[in-house]
Image (cartoon, rainbow, N blue to C red):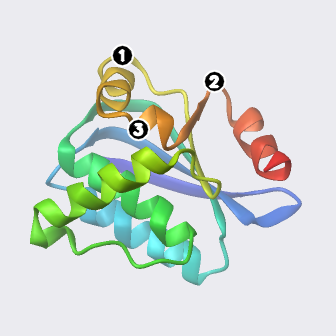
């Protein structure tokens, strides 16, 4: 999987992270590490562009949830501890939409995975990056 990050013009605290390929057990920790780095560099709001993501596993869901927690300033559960990460996800999905992290343009199986797991009630999904960025000022 490839990742590219860029800041939003006029707002260095908003970062866009493009994910391209498959997000699974082989690379989900790389996503978490990248989001940690962006947060340490000053990002406080994150747009995850899933336009080119072809597959999203349960490990990938852990990385998306962890990204939201990191942007909130919280430490995510250790993904190596197994079910504790999924219990944390379930609790956040029940609480409603996250305000520090959004998703853009998930396609096919990725969108279906997000809907089946309830992530579409935790992370707002937008059709384009501009709408996702504008949502932060509306929150």
Residue displayed at 45% across by 61% down: 67
Q: Is residue 79 left or right of residue 88?
A: left
Which residue bears the numbered disc 2?
Answer: 127
Answer with mark 3 or mark 1, whichever residue precedes in sequence.
1
Q: Are marks 1 and 2 in contact (CB under 8 Å)?
A: no
Residue displayed at 30% across by 33% down: 117
Image position, residue 27 (x, y; %): 23, 56
Q: Which quarter of the picture shows residue 128?
A: top right
Query: How much space separates mark 3 and mark 2, taking CA atoms?
Result: 16 Å
Label ID, residue 30:
none
Label ID, residue 119:
3
Image position, residue 1 (x, y; %): 30, 47
Image position, residue 86 (x, y; %): 22, 55
Q: Is residue 66 left or right of residue 58?
A: right
Residue 11 vertical placement versus 89 (above, below)? below
Badge 3 element: helix
Q: Are marks 3 and 1 in contact (CB under 8 Å)?
A: no
Answer with mark 3 or mark 2, whichever residue precedes in sequence.
3
Mark 3 vs mark 1, foreground winner is 3
The residue carrying pointer 3 sits among few (fewer than 14), some (14 to 19) or many (20 or more) residues within 10 Å by Cα, namely many
Label ID, residue 108:
1
Badge 2 element: loop
Residue 43 vertical placement versus 96 (above, below)? below
Image position, residue 101 (x, y; %): 58, 53
Answer with mark 1 or mark 2, whichever residue precedes in sequence.
1
Query: How much space separates mark 1 and mark 2, taking CA atoms?
Result: 13 Å
Badge 1 element: helix
| Viewer-nearest residue: 95 or 27 | 95
Mark 3 vs mark 2, foreground winner is 3
Query: How much space separates mark 3 and mark 1, taking CA atoms?
Result: 15 Å
Q: Which quarter of the picture shows residue 66?
A: bottom left
The residue carrying pointer 1 sits among few (fewer than 14), some (14 to 19) or many (20 or more) residues within 10 Å by Cα, namely few
């Amino acid at each position: 999987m490839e990742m590219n990050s860029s800041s939003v013009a006029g707002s260095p605290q908003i970062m866009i992270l493009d994910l391209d390929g498959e997000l699974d057990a082989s690379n989900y920790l790389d996503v978490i590490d990248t989001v940690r780095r962006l947060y340490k560099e000053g990002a406080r709001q994150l747009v995850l562009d899933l336009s080119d993501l072809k597959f999203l596993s349960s490990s990938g869901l852990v990385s998306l949830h962890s990204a939201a927690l990191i942007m909130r300033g919280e430490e995510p559960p250790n993904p190596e501890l197994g079910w504790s990460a999924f219990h944390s996800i379930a609790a956040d999905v029940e609480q409603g939409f996250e305000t520090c992290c959004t998703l853009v343009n998930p396609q096919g199986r990725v969108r279906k995975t997000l809907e089946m797991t309830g992530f579409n009630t935790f992370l707002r999904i937008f059709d384009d990056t501009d709408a996702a960025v504008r949502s932060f000022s509306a929150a």
